[in-house]
Image (tube, rainbow, N blue to C red):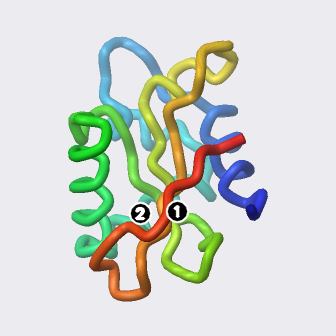
């Protein structure tokens, strides 16, 4: 597995958004420029983000305000996306299990073909 998704997660965790009950989207400005760029790039692919959100809703039952979707380098020949959970962004030094993960979609963004956990 590629180490790039792991690097993206570490970048996100190094600069958490401000606390105070704000959603992860409210803290977007506090994230590193590269991570912000990947989140904004994902927003320009709404058809892919809809597939990611449907998968997260079905498999995790998370509300869309609890995570961000960012583009991520593909690992297995599809289209890569990182699902970055707000708790991971808010507490980068936590010893709790991380919730963020990488999804690989097919080239047409019609379905998730693989899920990878960050290491």
Residue 20 appears in the rendering: yes
Residue positioned 34% across, 87% down in the render: 108
Up-down: is 95 above or below 36? above
* Label 2: how many Cα within 10 Å (few below 14, some 14–19, many 20+): some
Percent x, y for residue 55? 28, 54
Q: Quadrant of residue 2?
A: bottom right
* Left or right of residue 69, residue 104 in this image: right
Percent x, y for residue 54? 22, 55
Secondary structure of the residue carrying tag 1 is helix
Residue positioned 26% across, 65% down in the render: 51
Q: Which mark is residue 37?
A: 1
Q: Quadrant of the N terminus?
A: bottom right
Q: Which mark is residue 40?
A: 2
Percent x, y for residue 105? 42, 72
* Label 1: how many Cα within 10 Å (few below 14, some 14–19, many 20+): some
* Left or right of residue 17, residue 47 in this image: left
């Amino acid at each position: 597995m590629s180490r790039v998704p792991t690097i993206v997660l570490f970048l996100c965790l190094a600069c958490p958004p401000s606390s105070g009950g704000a959603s992860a989207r409210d803290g977007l400005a506090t994230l590193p420029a590269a991570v912000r760029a990947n989140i904004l790039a994902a927003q320009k692919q709404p058809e892919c983000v809809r597939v990611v959100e449907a998968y997260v809703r079905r498999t995790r039952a998370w509300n869309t305000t609890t995570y961000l979707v960012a583009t991520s380098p593909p690992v297995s020949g599809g289209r890569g996306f990182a699902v970055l959970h707000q708790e991971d962004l808010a507490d980068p030094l936590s010893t709790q299990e991380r919730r963020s993960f990488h999804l690989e979609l097919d080239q047409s963004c019609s379905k998730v073909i693989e899920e990878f956990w960050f290491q």
